[in-house]
Amino acid sequence: MRVMMHHRLSRLSTGHGPLTTPRSSVRRTRWSINSHNLSSDGGAVGDGPSTSGRIAVYGSEIGRQVFSASGKASLAELELFGSGGALNTVDIKRLTGRVKAAKSWREVVDVMESAQKMPAEQLDDVFVSAVLSTLPKLIRRADRKLTDAEKASVTSAVQALVRSQLQPRLAAGELDAQGVVTAAVGLAKLSDCDMYPSQPDLSQLLQQLAAHSVGHMRAGRMSGQGLSNFAWALAACGVRPPSSWLSEFYARVEEQMGSLNGQDIANIFWAVCRLELMPPWVTGSMPGIMGHAVRCVAGADTGQDPATILVCLAIWSRSFSYRPPDAKIQGLLNAMHPQLAKYAPQDLVSCVHSLVVLNISPSRAWMTTFYVVLRDRLVSSPTLSYADFQRLLWALSRIDFTPSQAWLRNFVEVSIGKLAHLRFRALSELIWSLACWGYTPTPEWLREYYRVTLPQLRHYKPQHLANSIVALKKLGCKVPAAWLEAALGAFCAQLADARAHDLVAFLDGIVDVCEDAAWMSAPATGTRLRDLAEFSSTKFEICDPVMHAKLLVALVTAKCYPSGAWLSKQQDSLTRSLAVEELEPETASDLRNAYAALSADISPSLAQELGARESTA
């Protein structure tokens, strides 16, 4: 059994400023399970008998009573299982075959409800495994969502199966290694479908399965694929096993690492990251593991496994300050390079996002190919989700590689249609990215940007407002007064959350991009700018000389003159800063000119500092 893992780790919590510690969470969106090797009794998946075959087994007369024309179970079948004699091995195989050959979840539930009338010992492990592997797959394939009543029907049948079949086998130690893995994966997927409502009960059951699996691991009966799938199931349900299980699991993974494929490695990496664990082989054997991973992902048809590996490395880097040697990561990128065109949009985004977190710069050839593929993904289906679009912009603005002007023109044309669907953070990242690339969009694009962002400015955080203003300044834009009014109001409403850098950058930028002198000189604007100036005095000790200069020049430009007490406090802070910070002659000149425009008396010590610095020009 191989779990086709389409998981997504949580988005690394990032912004324009320093990265914060990521939170691991499961975004279980797409998965399937290939059970071609589930059946330990030799029966192949999908070889369930036809109705006529069942009649041949059970006898023509009782067969016609038991099975309707549609092949579904009837009340007569329940009677047979309840009071008829024990089924033989062939009968059980036929019943299991019905599960494997089912075309809908309802057919599986019908069989499960029928089996509830049978003594537990009349069914075998293969039947239990077949149900738990087939049912979640068919639920996911259903052409519509199940109703509450249908969910209740499935849940009841699953709980009855667990109570009458799975738990007794666990208690008796009868489940083989494959049965343990299949049960764990099936229950995890049913939980994902909201078909196992009691999380405490599920957690306890998975812990029991984990305890039962220890003996199989020690005896070498769990393959690398089984280890991978079992770890995935635990992590998908957020169940952290005891340290005794982890120690055995880590040892077996390291022992079998050479036999794992790329998907197994990605599953295991994802599981331990999801549970916020740091296996000992991450810091010990990771270079060798990365070498094996490179061989596994070379030629892969999808980017899911390499993207997951990179995301996990990024999370370990942020959470545990560990990453493998740069050469190993570059080797992984080289193996991925020829296959980038096959990658899904979200995998492309996860790759570059993780590389930024890892502080790894891809080669120019790699990035050139990436941008070509990305251009196609922006206009074809499936395209990027809006959440991935935001993450993409955050990452690309931090990679030292500017795409071609033709690519940027195409990107701006495509992005204008996305503006109305983006949230404030993505909009901030978008204008910031364009500024980093030095590409000024068309007037039509800017008009749409102002229209879309204006009603959202009240939701912007101070750092997003500051970054947006700085980006517009870098692009040489002149911003409408109505937009600036809303941005200034939003910033002043959140002063307590504003960092010193954001405050100075916002004030410096807003006086530069304003195209309306009447708005800038309006009393209401002056009041808010003075509020910013007064609040900035609480941040003086954090300001370096350049920030002091920008703050003063911005106030002078806005004709917003602070009080004598404010200037005295600012000069004292600047003097202390100059004792440990270098000051460019141009900045020293700006400071002297600003003080002159404010008619401010400069303290002798500061005047000496500024004069000495200025005289070196």
Image (spheres, grey):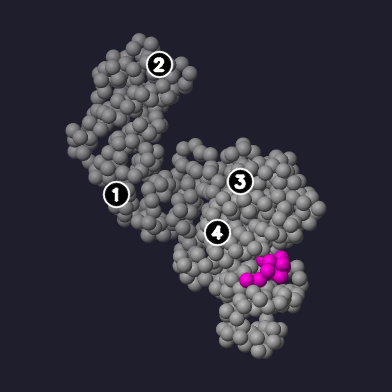
The local secondary structure at tag 2 comes to helix
Residue in view at x 72 percent, y 48 percent: 249
Magenta highlight range:
117-128
Residue in view at x 46 percent, y 53 percent: 387
Residue 275, labelled with which disc?
3
Residue positioned most to the front: 83
Label 2 vs label 1, nearer the camera: 1
Task: Identify residue for label 2.
Answer: 575
The local secondary structure at tag 4 comes to loop
Residue 455, labelled with which disc?
1
The answer to whether residue 274 is left or right of residue 297 is left
* CB atoms of marks 2 and 1 within 8 Å: no
Q: What's the distance in space between the residues labelled 3 and 2, CA to CA?
A: 50 Å
Residue in view at x 64 percent, y 42 percent: 277
* CB atoms of marks 3 and 2 within 8 Å: no
| Quarter of the image where one finds residue 589 | top left
Residue 196, labelled with which disc?
4
Labels 2 and 4: the sequence-earlier one: 4
Labels 3 and 2: the sequence-earlier one: 3
Q: Reply above or below: 189 against 552.
A: below
Residue 58: % across, % down: 69, 84
Residue in view at x 52 percent, y 60 percent: 194
Labels 2 and 1: the sequence-earlier one: 1
